[in-house]
């Protein structure tokens, strides 16, 4: 049984169900029992394949990314391979079409073995094990296997944007729970794998003592559950008579992202959250920047942030990309960025990136253009207090928030 192969997969597991054939006792010189199966094992062999960003992001991403990332920060994509893989094996009632029980096993990157019974049907789920931020929850009836992330204590840069005149996020827009980015995770569910006792369905090999071993091969392809977005901020008109206006960013927040995924169906949750990262790469100066769909080139500064998410809400992102299907907008996506000004002050803006995000359900390059010439003069004239700084404290559900200037 070969699971459907998705062309953008990275990790491939080959499950070898090893069945040892034992000859029945001889009842007479010319009569013996039929062959039967006594020992059954599934041997999981792991091979590593690259996830091709061209297939997840479409080849145009190379033209969209102006920032020089690779030379300084290395690959943009997913890690090469996991150290550990978790396998969850479910017994399936084929009459009720329900999972009835399960057992699990942890494998290293070279694989391992688990015991199975013949004449039984199984569902097998595999995913990389040992994640830091992901929380897993399985329903009691084994119908759902959810993955979410923990809440975060980081400051949301969309919540602090109310001070700015340069905001595209409506003031009355809902508040979001802030959560951590998920770890890179890949997985697969192989449905209705029947372990037969018919030796004709297996490949025949011999073990060390010469006994025949019958091997049933199952090819499983692990697809990403988590998707990578590169947020590229292109700053134009960034120099005036006093020098550079914007020097970088303290952090960015993206809203309207799904809170988690149901791993069996690969459908993301309908409810949405925000994710904040403070890992902003240093600003680079570029000449002759030419944005997609814009004929005029200009000189400017660029900084970027890389973010991992479950993707957009209420969809199977891989399915949408594979079938080139449009994505329904359940919630708008906004990005808030805390811009560093040359005098040390922070100026926060937001941008509506809904259209770009929904064209890229499996990740890609999101470009935001910032006109530094529109930074209000009072922010450039402001001199920060010695020892002072912004203070933002809020409870987990974000319904209560305190913002104040703290002078020590």
Image: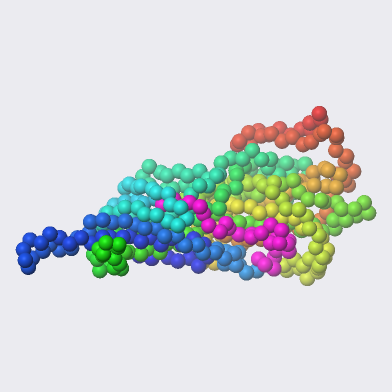
Q: Position of residue 335 (x, y in %)?
A: 69, 51
Q: Looking at the image, which is closer to me, 201 or 177? A: 201
- Give the magenta range: 61-87
Q: Is residue 1 left or right of residue 366?
A: left
Q: Quadrant of residue 154?
A: top right
Q: Is residue 139 left or right of residue 241?
A: left
Q: Position of residue 385 (x, y in %)?
A: 85, 35
**Could you tell me if residue 81 is visible in this image?**
yes
The quadrant in which the C terminus is found is top right
Hey, which residue is sitting farthest top in the picture?
Answer: 408
Determine whether 54 is above or below 155 in the image.
below
Q: Looking at the image, which is closer to me, 133 or 173? A: 133
Task: Write the residue at 66% across / 57% down.
Answer: 230
Q: Is residue 384 left or right of residue 226?
A: right
Q: Is residue 253 left or right of residue 374?
A: left
**Could you tell me if residue 3 is visible in this image?**
no
Task: Write the residue at 73% across / 61% down.
Answer: 67
């Amino acid at each position: 049984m070969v699971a459907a192969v998705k062309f953008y997969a990275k990790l491939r597991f080959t499950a070898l169900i090893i069945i040892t054939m034992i000859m029945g006792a001889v009842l007479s010189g010319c009569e013996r029992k039929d062959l039967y199966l006594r020992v059954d094992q599934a041997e999981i062999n792991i091979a590593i394949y690259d996830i091709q960003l061209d297939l997840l992001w479409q080849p145009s991403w190379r033209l969209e990314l102006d920032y020089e990332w690779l030379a300084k920060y290395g690959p943009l994509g997913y890690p090469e391979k996991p150290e550990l893989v978790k396998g969850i094996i479910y017994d399936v009632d084929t009459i009720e079409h329900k999972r009835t029980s399960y057992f699990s096993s942890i494998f290293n990157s070279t694989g391992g073995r688990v015991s199975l019974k013949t004449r039984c049907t199984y569902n097998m789920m595999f995913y990389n094990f040992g994640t830091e931020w992901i929380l897993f929850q399985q329903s009691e009836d084994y119908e759902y296997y959810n993955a979410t992330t923990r809440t975060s204590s980081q400051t949301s840069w969309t919540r602090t944007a109310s001070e700015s005149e340069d905001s595209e996020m409506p003031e009355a827009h809902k508040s979001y729970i802030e959560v951590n980015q998920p770890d890179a995770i890949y997985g697969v569910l192989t449905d209705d794998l029947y372990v037969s006792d018919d030796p004709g369905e297996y490949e025949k090999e011999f073990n060390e003592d010469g006994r025949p071993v019958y091997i049933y091969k199952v090819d499983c392809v692990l697809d990403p559950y988590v998707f990578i977005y590169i947020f590229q901020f292109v700053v134009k008109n960034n120099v005036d008579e006093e020098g550079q206006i914007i020097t970088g960013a303290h952090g960015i927040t993206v809203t309207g992202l799904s809170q988690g995924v149901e791993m069996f169906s690969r459908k993301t949750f309908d409810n949405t959250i925000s994710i904040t990262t403070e890992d902003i790469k240093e600003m680079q100066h570029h000449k002759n920047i030419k944005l997609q769909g814009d004929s005029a080139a200009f000189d400017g500064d660029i900084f970027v942030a890389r973010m991992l998410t479950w993707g957009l809400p209420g969809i199977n992102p891989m399915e949408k990309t594979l079938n080139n299907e449009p994505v329904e907008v359940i919630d708008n996506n906004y990005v808030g960025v805390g811009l560093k000004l040359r005098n040390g002050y922070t100026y926060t803006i937001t941008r509506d990136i809904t259209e770009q995000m929904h064209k890229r359900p499996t990740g890609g390059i999101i470009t935001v253009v910032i006109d530094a010439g529109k930074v209000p003069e009072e922010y450039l004239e402001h001199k920060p207090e010695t020892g002072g700084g912004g203070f933002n404290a809020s409870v987990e559900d974000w319904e209560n928030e305190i913002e104040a200037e703290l002078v020590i």
